Image (cartoon, rainbow, N blue to C red):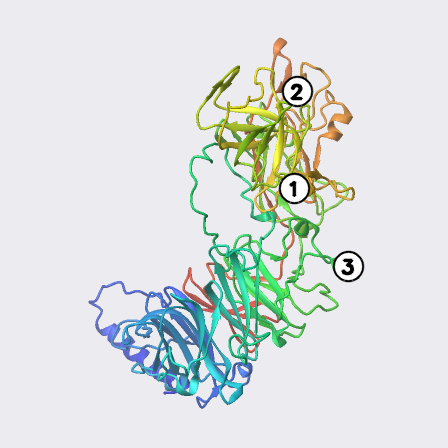
Amino acid sequence: MHPAVSVRALGLVGLLLGAFGAIGCSDTANYETRQIKRPLGMAVTCADAGGVPVGLDGCDGEGVRRTGWVLDGDEAGLVILDLDTGRHFDADPFLPGYNALPVGGVPLTLRGSADSRFVYVLLGRDDELGGASLLRLDTGELDPRMEGVRQALACDVRDFALGRAAFPGQPDGVPVALVLAVCPEGSVIWALDIESFGDLDIGGAAVPKWVVPGEALRLGLSVEGTTAYVASTLALDAGAGALPQGDLLTRIDLLAPDGAADSRRTVALGSPGRMAIDALGEPGGGLCLESPAPARRPTRVRGAPAVSPGDAFVYLPLGEPAGIAVFHGNLDRIDVNAPLDGVAGSGNRLLAHLGSWDIPLDSPAIAVAFVEPESGVRAVASTENGDLVRIVVTPDEANPVPHVLEAAEDQTGSVASSPDTRFGGEWIASAYLTRPDLASFGSAEIVLLSDADDLYRYYGIEFQGDTRLVLSETWTATYEGILPGTRRCGTLTFGDQGEVQLVDPTADFCALGVVAGVHAREGDVVVLRPELPVACGTLRGGVLEYRVAAERPERLVLAPAFVSMPLPEPGCLEGPVSFEIRVEDGWTVVGSRTGFLHAQVADGDACVVPEDADPLWNGRAYAPVPRDPSGRVTACPSREGDPQFSVEAWDEALFQNPVMKFRVVPGCRVGQGFLPEVAPAVRDTQLMFRTISGFAPLDVSLSGLPGAGLAVAGTRVFGTDAANGLVFEVDVEEMTLISTRY
């Protein structure tokens, strides 16, 4: 039965069911009305008025009817609907509601053929065959009793795609279904000849295969279907000269046999930069008590690789840090945050400084698809927070920078939330209003700045102006806070001249931003937390604190921080010891995505700050000190501009980084003689606020949680909302939501 005929039949069935419903009004059961429960993916096919399949590039034609095929994991079947009318195909008219077409097993994902003739469903377990399989359904034979053709598979199948691969005597390739699987001997791609589909021996010589490094995750294809791009992950480092541990992307030429020269290339995604550091670690010890096996790194890959027209670019959706990795078709990595010669406005100096090469997103990318509106090639990406964003691929006069989020027409300024304060282990909302004894940013107001009508100062926090440098994230200023990444395990070494060094061969103290100094506010302090309290000579205590006298990439020279705590003597503190490094008499300023900013790098065996380093690479804030040694201030609460502080003190206390600027204003209390004075800050007191970037990307808010995959038909993009059980249709030219269907 053709799709157009099935819709008319569906109308008759609906009338009959309505009539029976009116007669049987004694039935009070609450039937499920939601049609889509747990979407695993979606395909779109098109046909003309006579039911003849139309290729996906012709779906915008006059009189063409579009059919949506949604794979439902809970229903173990296909929810089929007419995308033009919203009517559902009912696979069992004798049961209430519209029923999914059973696929006979545990479904994983689906694809539609480019000519709209077939829909394929990958099954992790086939009820009929007993193992994995690939099911093919003829879209021109839509019927409740349709069974399709089943091709038996093996191993743990992960993904599949429809393309072309070379066979003996067929060097230009034949149509195939490419199946990605993880087998005991390793990951593999099988090429299933469509002409023999259903009768193939998956382990036989008639089925070509290509080996994939690591554990296979997702599969993408070039537009022509002759080049495969496979995302995989390698659990452990294979050693020198081999592929590194972590996420990989492999390009495979399907017109060449596996092992042929220049037929494949594998690249590692590598580190996402300093954005990966856990920025808000809690103080504590015990890091040396256990020596667990090397932890397996979680993969960042969230969706299948997407390939642009002409195989020019490959986009890979990534989780935290959320973004999209961009490659040339030959897998040369593109640093999208580096400035381009002669292109004004290109580059993002903050992300480049953090070592990030990816397109930044506020939420993990789930799927990417390429489209070609009149403005040129664009990519659209669905994100976990329910947005569909558009990305410039081919630059034009209005958008001269490629591989960036396209900007919406209306832009606003960035916003900071009201700061909350953590004191004594408890959070106090807007403590600047009720606790004058605690530090703040010196203001309780949102103030319109006089030099710009659209810029504001939020509770003492002022943005620098470039909204693209502002990430939507949480910032925390912590008094004498721990430098991110410095809660570690090391050992002490002792020199002939009494020099004591803390050594950690796995660390790079330069990259972590550790600073040496012999006076307060000049250097950091090391807090040693031995497993058992120390009682050795004149040294006593369970927590030992020393100043960093000199820093090296893998070791720190220690000096006494207090007269009452001498340096350990040889034999006093043997074996591994847990430690952390803190700022002294200052505040660490750390973003949950940006991390701790600094400009320090390793130069041989020394830590240096390059002469041309931007002073805005700064993650340390210091509160001003009053003129009077007693700490006398004018009034409580302390406010920015108090005349009891010198102008120089206010100027020196201005914290600035590329994102914002503010001053940490000390708290005050009533002291002797009932006069107001500075209240000393307590270690681990925190001021926390959230920044929301004023940069508005060109997007469509879909709400809910977008399901896996995007289907492109003509100039429209289709997808699913897993949270609300919807199918959405988006016009990618206008970036507007056309319809949502249940």
The extreme top residue here reads 673
Residue 181 seen: yes
Q: Is residue 676 left or right of residue 192?
A: right
Q: Is residue 288 left or right of residue 561?
A: left
Measure how far apart labels 1 and 3 are at the Cα level.
Answer: 25 Å
Q: Residues within 10 Å of mark 1 (few under 14, many from 20)?
A: many
Q: Which residue is tagged 3?
A: 344
- Residue 329 at x, y = what percent? 62, 71
| Residue at x 57% of width, y 34% of height | 503
Q: Are marks 1 and 3 in contact (CB under 8 Å)?
A: no
The residue nearer to you, when weighing 96 against 193, is: 193
The residue nearer to you, when weighing 381 against 554, is: 554
N-terminal of the two: label 1 or label 3?
A: 3
The extreme left residue here reads 26
Q: Quadrant of the C terminus?
A: bottom left
In the picture, the disc for residue 597 is 1
In the picture, the disc for residue 645 is none
- Residue 541 at x, y = what percent? 49, 20
Q: Quadrant of the N terminus?
A: bottom left
Q: Which residue is tagged 2?
A: 635
Image quadrant in which you'd find residue 308 = bottom right
- Give the amino acid at mark 3: Ala
| Residue at x 69% of width, y 22% of height | 625
The extreme right residue here reads 342
Q: Secondary structure at mark 3?
A: loop
Closest to the camera, between mark 1 and mark 2, is 1
- Residue 556 at x, y = what percent? 62, 32
